Image (spheres, coloured by chain):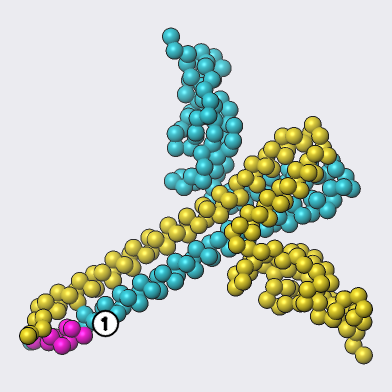
Chain colours: A cyan, B yellow
Amino acid sequence: MEGPDAAELEDRWRRALADLDNLRKRYARELGRERSAEREMVTTAFLPVLDNLDRALEHADADPRSIIEGVRSLREQALAVVSGLGFRREDEAGVPFDPTRHEVVGVVQTDGSEAAPGSVVAVVRPGYGAPGHQLRPAAVTVAQRPES
Amino acid sequence: MEGPDAAELEDRWRRALADLDNLRKRYARELGRERSAEREMVTTAFLPVLDNLDRALEHADADPRSIIEGVRSLREQALAVVSGLGFRREDEAGVPFDPTRHEVVGVVQTDGSEAAPGSVVAVVRPGYGAPGHQLRPAAVTVAQRPES
């Protein structure tokens, strides 16, 4: 039995090249579309927070104290959106320092009685992220045993 | 001059097929990465709003009235983030009704002296979007000439 002849093989080769070219173009378009769709999805997730900011201000002058409750629930809502997008808030003190999640902004000398050396004493600014996808590290102060 | 022989053409064809296969695998990986990157970028853009929500609450009890100013600037900040992501806020009254940007939630009868028939009388809930990329339409009431 004979295999395909040269003309047939050249035809196959040219069609494969055309497929490659089309695939490249299609993927370039899809990549842009996927990015847009993701941007729209994530921004839309935050719109209820904006709505409640509007609402909080509408009622602010009537009862200034009620706005504190409003801001408290706004904060919960915003955190729930971020967490729903898959990013955990990192704001725990007392945990061991972890260079993949913490950024040291201060060192506190300790003899170990109040905080374990190498542990997070305080979180100055919370971090946010998912494993392998850190939005930003938590800015923390860390306990250190005094040098003797 | 002779062209490439059958063996050479078959080789080219097989290499083009392998390229196609690799391209498919590479793009599948890239698509996921691009989506993650976009999600991280957009969420990160909102983190300063979360920081200021934290801060507003820290100072709330000291001076409840100051929190109103805080919420006002929080709202400006959140709107600036959304606008920086390319999405315009749609909250104008008096403009002609536009089905691509407005959703009618109420009709107001008018003889045309106060509001032009077919114009937006009031925005009940603002919309957000970019041309061709609407996050959600503005919920509006629309002026209508009474049927005679």
Q: Is residue B132 left or right of residue A146?
A: right
Specify the principal SS of the magenta part: helix
Image vertical order of residue A148 relative to residue A72, above or below:
above
Q: Is residue A135 magenta?
A: no
**Where are the magenta residues, as a range?**
A2-11
Which residue is located at x 40 percent, y 70 percent?
A27
Chain for numbered disc 1: A
Which residue reaches farthest top?
A: A148
In this view, the residue in front, B110 or A55, is: B110
Which residue is located at x 17 percent, y 87 percent?
A8
Which residue is located at x 20 percent, y 71 percent?
B15
Image vertical order of residue A64 relative to residue A5, above or below:
above
Residue A114 position within the rendered picture, expressed as x and y whole percent measured from the top left: 56, 17
Residue B137 position within the rendered picture, expressed as x and y whole percent measured from the top left: 70, 69
**Tag count:** 1
Which quadrant is the C terminus of chain B positioned in? Answer: bottom right
Q: Is residue A23 left or right of residue A75?
A: left
Which residue is located at x 40 percent, y 74 percent?
A26
Which residue reaches farthest bottom?
A: B148
Q: Is residue B13 left or right of residue B6?
A: right
Q: Residues within 10 Å of mark 1 (few under 14, many from 20)?
A: some
Image vertical order of residue A5 relative to residue A111, above or below:
below
Residue B94 position within the rendered picture, expressed as x and y whole percent measured from the top left: 81, 72
Residue identified by numbered label 1: A15
Name the amino acid type tagged 1: Arg
Residue B100 position within the rendered picture, expressed as x and y whole percent measured from the top left: 68, 76
